[in-house]
Image (tube, rainbow, N blue to C red):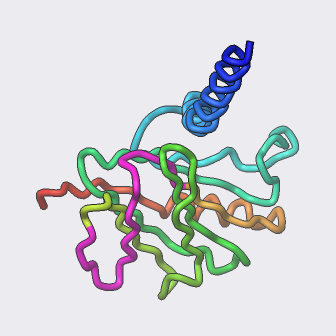
């Protein structure tokens, strides 16, 4: 009887540990299925309106990228919205773990330029921010704080001025 109790506890413990390990990956896969699974493409959220109240935070407008560094680094460039109180770029691993946050204050001259590289690729890039990814795949989320109805069109224009390009590792 005692060995059955020990076996049961071991199986429950193993199941719990498996759940803790696998759950973030399942969440990421579900997120990709809901949004779209295309890699290395900038995706913009719908602009807020009375008919789209189901955003994670209605005060923010989002853009995101599901990235894959298998074919090279990614270069993110764009204009920083100077009229907004908050703008950020957040980087997440494939298991949804956060690893880097860049805010508008981290950049100069009203523009951002970031190279996203794998762990082994840490070359010096001058004034360009180099973000080192702990995984080949993951997610980048751009957040724009929208405090008034007038900010919506402004943010939409800023989103159109953001670009993502693949930089081949052999370049």
- Residue at 61% x, 74% y is 81
Relative to residue 142, is residue 147 drawn left or right? right
Reply above or below: 25 against 108. above
Give yes or no for residue 109 being in the magenta stretch: no
Relative to residue 107, is residue 46 drawn left or right? right
Q: Nearer the viewer, residue 94 or 46?
A: 94
Seen from this angle, which residue lies furthest left? Answer: 170
- Residue at 41% x, 40% y is 39
Residue 2, by quadrant, is top right
Where is residue 101 shown, x and y percent of the image?
A: 56, 69
Reply above or below: 71 against 77. above
Seen from this angle, which residue lies furthest front? Answer: 2
Where is residue 34 shown, x and y percent of the image?
A: 62, 30
Where is residue 73 shown, x and y percent of the image?
A: 29, 57
Q: Quadrant of the C terminus?
A: bottom left
How many marks overall?
A: 0
Seen from this angle, which residue lies furthest right? Answer: 50
Reply above or below: 32 against 169. above
Residue 141, by quadrant, is bottom right
Give yes or no for residue 124 being in the magenta stretch: yes
Q: Nearer the viewer, residue 99 or 35?
A: 99
- Residue at 12% x, 57% y is 170
- Residue at 40% x, 59% y is 133
Residue 7, by quadrant, is top right
Stretch of the chain drawn in magenta: 122-140
Reply above or below: 21 against 155. above
Q: Quadrant of the N terminus?
A: top right
Where is residue 26 shown, x and y percent of the image?
A: 58, 31
């Amino acid at each position: 009887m005692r060995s059955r109790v020990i076996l049961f506890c071991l199986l429950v413990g193993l199941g719990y540990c498996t759940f803790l390990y696998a759950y973030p990956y399942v969440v990421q896969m579900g997120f990709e299925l809901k949004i779209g699974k295309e890699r290395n493409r900038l995706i913009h959220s719908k602009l807020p309106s009375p008919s789209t109240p189901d955003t994670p935070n209605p005060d923010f407008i989002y853009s995101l990228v599901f990235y894959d560094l298998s074919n090279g680094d990614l270069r993110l460039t764009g204009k920083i919205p100077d009229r907004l109180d908050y703008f950020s770029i957040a980087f997440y691993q494939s298991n949804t773990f956060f690893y880097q946050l860049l805010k508008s204050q981290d950049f100069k001259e009203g523009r951002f330029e970031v190279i996203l590289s794998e762990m082994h690729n840490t070359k010096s890039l001058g004034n360009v921010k180099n973000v080192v990814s702990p995984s080949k795949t993951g997610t980048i989320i751009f957040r724009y704080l929208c405090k008034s109805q007038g900010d919506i069109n402004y943010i939409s224009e800023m989103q159109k001025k953001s670009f993502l390009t693949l930089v081949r590792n052999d370049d």
